[in-house]
Structure formats: structure tokens, C-alpha cells
């Protein structure tokens, strides 16, 4: 899942893409409504591809966690995003059981679910072919069909 082109800007809701650069800023476009505005160097921008989730052993890139959610939901939205804190934590534990509960907060989980749902609703969550087991199955079916036709 490629999320490197999407940015979070501190103090602003939603996600953004960089569309141009200016002298002392970059021009970003909101994924939510398509509005463009300058983001200055004083604003903290974080690429989603640079974010990772703490686990007890190491860190897992956010893209891998989103892929886990995508597979758990069979490509659907996260319903737990608007639930109680206990529901949010329980859902996160079902996706990533070994997360570090001392360093990953409920607010982080809510933000992750919100980003996932936003990208999903806009059709921007796409699995790379190598991440999808479906492509391997399709190739195997084609090979079997060709072998049967040769027989």
C-alpha cells in the first residue's frame, strides 16, 4: 500500500497531497474537498509513509498496519473509528496484537482509523499486486487452465 504521497499537517484536519512548491512553502491540496493552500515551513507536515506504529519488539510502518486493517475488513471501512475507547483498543488489538500499549495512545488509533477511512472513501487505498494474494491465485488458475487445454 503506497501512502507516501499523503501528508498530515498538524493543527489541520484530514490529509493532503503536495501539488507544487513555492518560495517559502509548498502548495497542498486537501483530499477531503480539493481546496489548495500554502503550507509553510513553520507548520509541521508528516508524510504517512514516514509514520510507524510501536510494537513491543520493533516498529511497523503505517502502510503495513493499513494493509492489515484492509485485509481484516475485506476492503471495507473501519466501523470502530467512532466507538468507545474500549472498542477502539479492542479492534486495534485484533489487528496488531503486539502493539506497545505504553506508547500507542487511543488518540493515535482514532487518527489511524480516520486516515484509513478517508483514503478508503476517496478510493486511494490500493494494494500493490505483490501485496495481494489474489494475483497469485489468478496466475495459478491461468497456469492450470493452460495445462488442462494442452492435455
Image (cartoon, grey):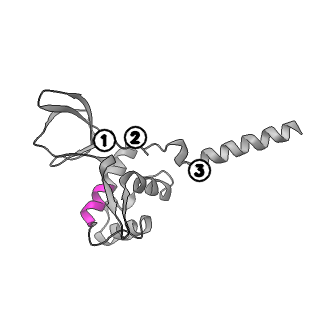
- Of 3 and 122, nearer the camera is 3
Q: Is residue 55 left or right of residue 22?
A: right
Check contact, mark 3 vs mark 1: CB within 8 A: no
Please say if 27 is above or below 94: above
Which mark is drawn over residue 133?
3
Label 2 sits on a secondary structure element that is: loop
| Badge 2 density bin: few <14, some 14–19, many ≥20, Cα 10 Å | some
- The percent coordinates of residue 35 (x first, y second) are 22, 32
| Residue at 41%, 43% in the rendered image | 2
Residue farthest right in this picture:
151
Check contact, mark 2 vs mark 3: CB within 8 A: no
Circle 1 sits on which residue? 6
Residue range in magenta is: 105-112
| Badge 3 density bin: few <14, some 14–19, many ≥20, Cα 10 Å | few
| Residue at 29%, 69% in the rendered image | 85
Counting every numbered tag in the picture gives: 3
Q: Is residue 7 left or right of residue 139?
A: left
- Is 108 one of the magenta-colored residues? yes
Residue farthest front in this picture:
58
Please say if 54 is above or below 147: below
Check contact, mark 2 vs mark 1: CB within 8 A: yes
User: Hey, which quadrant is residue 102 in on the image?
Assistant: bottom left
- The percent coordinates of residue 135 (x first, y second) are 61, 44
Circle 2 sits on which residue? 124
Give the distance between the C-alpha atoms of the residues marked 2 and 1, in whole angstroms: 10 Å
Please say if 8 is above or below 64: above
In this view, the mark in front (2 or 3): 3
Q: Earlier in the sequence, mark 2 or mark 3?
A: 2
- Is 77 one of the magenta-colored residues? no
Amino acid at each position: 500500500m503506497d501512502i507516501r504521497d499523503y501528508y498530515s499537517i498538524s493543527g489541520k484536519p484530514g490529509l493532503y497531497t503536495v501539488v507544487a512548491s513555492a518560495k517559502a512553502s509548498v502548495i497542498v491540496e486537501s483530499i477531503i474537498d480539493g481546496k489548495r493552500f500554502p503550507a509553510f515551513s513553520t507548520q509541521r507536515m508528516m508524510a504517512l509513509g514516514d509514520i510507524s506504529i510501536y510494537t513491543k519488539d520493533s516498529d511497523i510502518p503505517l502502510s503495513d498496519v493499513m494493509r492489515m486493517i484492509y485485509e481484516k475488513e475485506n476492503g471495507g471501512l473501519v466501523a470502530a473509528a467512532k466507538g468507545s475507547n474500549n472498542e477502539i483498543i479492542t479492534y486495534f488489538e485484533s489487528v496488531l496484537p503486539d502493539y506497545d500499549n505504553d506508547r500507542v495512545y487511543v488518540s493515535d488509533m482514532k487518527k489511524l482509523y480516520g486516515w484509513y477511512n478517508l483514503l478508503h472513501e476517496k478510493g486511494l487505498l490500493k494494494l500493490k499486486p505483490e501485496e495481494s494474494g489474489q494475483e497469485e491465485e489468478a496466475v495459478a488458475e491461468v497456469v492450470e487452465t493452460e495445462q488442462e487445454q494442452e492435455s
